Image (cartoon, rainbow, N blue to C red):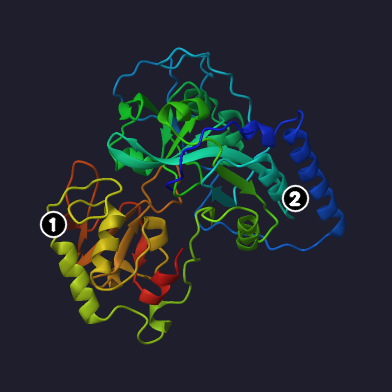
Amino acid sequence: MHPERHRRAHPGPADLTRGGSGIRQDLGFLLRSRRRRDHRRLIPFIVVTLVAVLTADVLLLTENREAADEPAAAEPVRARQTPQQSLMADAHTVRPVAPVGKLHKPHVFVVTRKPFSQKQLQKIARLSGIRAMELADAASVMLDGKRVQTLAVEPSTFRAYTPKVTATSDPLWNNVAAGDVAVSFVLGNDGGLSLHRKINGPSGPLRIGAYATTGFGAVDAVVSKDTGRELGLPRDNALIISAPKADSARLRDRVLKLLPKGTQAALVNPVRPQPQVKARDWPTGAFMTGDQLTVALRAAASKLGRPYVWGAEGPDSFDCSGLVQWAFAQAGIRMPRVTHQQWVTGPQVPLSQAHPGDLLFWRHDPTNPGYISHVAIYWGDGKMLHAPRTGDVVKIVPVSTRNLAGVVRVSPQAAAKVR
């Protein structure tokens, strides 16, 4: 996401979800009338399954801002008192965060070059199947020296688009409203952004207030709209659409037709379903050749000792999936960028049958137990080559089976189709 910066006044997220005048009433009426028409017609819809889990049994790691900023280990928070209103560094008053209402699963995520206009939002709201929409600010932001895909949101309304436990955590959203940043577990743990730590942002220090899943695989940080203004994020250039009874792919295409060229629209956490056919049943030639495997393994081994850097894709530093993508590219294999997409690049095989060049995957994220959060390349003889985490380097180590999700044998054809 590299949207241009614009600062014209446009309706905020609340305009799409609350009562009032102007666009708020218009969109509310449109969505309600659309639901009534859809119900009367009883048109069958395709129910879209999101492959990347938007799970309700996530574990939130957070802390009230009223607590001391000691560098303590992250602790799970399930039921704590909502903190009193606190002040951000610039001492502006924090608006209270409203209780969570009805939850909405996100299905389409749209980013434009300019802020959404009222006319554009009204046209999108009329599309069949849309049940709710939420505006946000989106950009790639430098946090602690790392380029992080970041959303600036209205906590009171955006929380309804996240998994249940995330949505219902008042401490989390009060902390975000008070100026904290909530980051994904992968960015926090592997990227070295420890909970409660203060990090450098474009406009000054930011406090890591929580590790929490938002349900958006490509988004690793969430801040409030006010904090987003301080960080320089463009206004109202992102739109989250919930359409549970619509074909998400078709809806995405219809949305794009209503918006200017250069608009990006993606399904939330888009991946192909995990192939169910066993490796022995795949056709001859479906997998990498011996020469391709040799090139990929040698390429990965040539980077032994290079530092882990979250988000890095080489050639001098890597994160775990960046190393896989770079090494396989040297053998002419087009691999997707992130771990949960690399997980579906071929069939699964038992660890006992793993061959050098197969990929090993783990689920280490306690905030989203179903999420694939780490990948390594099987080296052979019970060892693996990987880029572990911040502060470590590319290395060969014994295979760890703790939280092991499975082993995948890469098919170049399957990998090229993952989006």
* Rendered residue at 36%/87% (across/down): 284
Res. 413 in view: yes
* Rendered residue at 35%/68% (across/down): 408
Image coordinates of residue 383 in percent, x first then y, are 19, 62
Q: Element under label 2?
A: loop
In the image, residue 153 sits, relative to residue 329, either above or below, namely: above
The alpha-carbon separation of the residues under discs 2 and 1 comes to 54 Å
* Left/right of residue 299 with respect to residue 135 in the rendered view: left
Mark carried by residue 126: 2
Q: Residues within 10 Å of mark 1 (few under 14, many from 20)?
A: some
Foreground pick, 139 / 322: 139
Q: Element under label 1?
A: loop
Considering every residue shown, the one lying at the far bottom of the view is 284
Residue where numbered disc 1 is placed: 304
* Left/right of residue 199 with respect to residue 100 in the rendered view: left
Q: Earlier in the sequence, mark 2 or mark 1?
A: 2
Considering every residue shown, the one lying at the far right of the view is 40
Image coordinates of residue 298 in percent, x first then y, are 15, 68
